[in-house]
Amino acid sequence: QQQVKQSPQSLIVQKGGISIINCAYENTAFDYFPWYQQFPGKGPALLIAIRPDVSEKKEGRFTISFNKSAKQFSLHIMDSQPGDSATYFCAGQYNYGQNFVFGPGTRLSVLP
Amino acid sequence: DTEVTQTPKHLVMGMTNKKSLKCEQHMGHRAMYWYKQKAKKPPELMFVYSYEKLSINESVPSRFSPECPNSSLLNLHLHALQPEDSALYLCASSLIGGNQPQHFGDGTRLSIL
């Protein structure tokens, strides 16, 4: 029940295209859902985050869509660029972040 | 550059050595975390400190010993590690209360010979 599922495992997109990564969870105790971007040799960097009482959040080219009833959420990267090539992790947290679970990750490659 | 600083960036040690990993943040965060990340896997939570007290230990073997000497510093003491402990060790910190994201350092790449 702690698990956060994520798909696809890997994704290849052409430059300028839309990248879509989907996540799902079971634990209704989760109250915050951050997305992290990780480049090789670096730590995960916070990209964007959403609370379950919000259906959509947009920051620049990055948008989270949240469906509370379905317990699903997704990351959309508009106008994908080669510099977006990285591993993306969705996550769920509760208990003021003391309980934190990453999804398994999606390796995104954006072709020039 | 991240605001969570981890040293050293790389560490190679034998199975009988004792070494320590260090993590430092000056963002006023009172929660600090240690994670272990294997290649092509997500980070796995090891320990959580809240207000300098250990609040979560995810059944980590005793050869890993965390320490939080003050609100800005977090150490991970290593002793008698096994080859399977080779991984990227990540430190993170966050504010406490409400929905607060964790901020990660770039990790220490640990290799056990």
Image (spheres, rainbow, N blue to C red):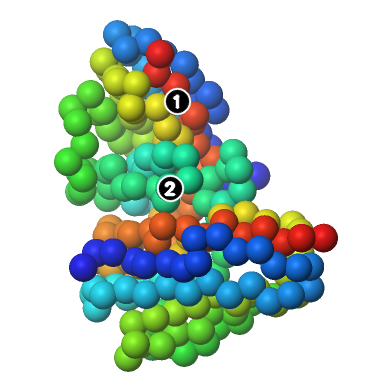
How far across and how far down the image is residue A69, in percent? 32, 91
From the top left corner, tell me how far across and down residue A16 is, in percent: 79, 73
Camera-nearest residue between B101 and A27: A27
Q: In this view, does A20 lie above or below A37?
A: below
Instruction: Indicate the amino acid at tag 1.
Output: Leu
Q: Residue A107's image quarter?
A: bottom right
Q: Name the residue under label 1.
A: B110
Left or right: residue B87 versus residue A70 is: right
Q: Is residue B106 left or right of residue B30?
A: right
Q: Inspect this view and state whether residue B100 appears.
A: no
Marker disc for residue B41? 2
Judge whether A47 appears above or below B72 on screen: below
Which quadrant of the structure image shows residue B89? top left
- Compared across the picture, whether A80 is left or right of A42 comes to right
Q: Is mark 1 on a helix, strand or loop?
A: strand
Q: Which of A31 and A5 is in front in this view?
A: A5
**Which residue is painted at 37% across and 40% down in the image?**
B36
Q: Which secondary structure, mark 2? A: loop
Question: Closer to us: mark 1 or mark 2?
Answer: 2
Number of numbered markers: 2
Which residue occupies 65% across, 44% down?
B1
Q: Which chain carries label 2?
A: B
Report the amino acid beneath label 2. Lys
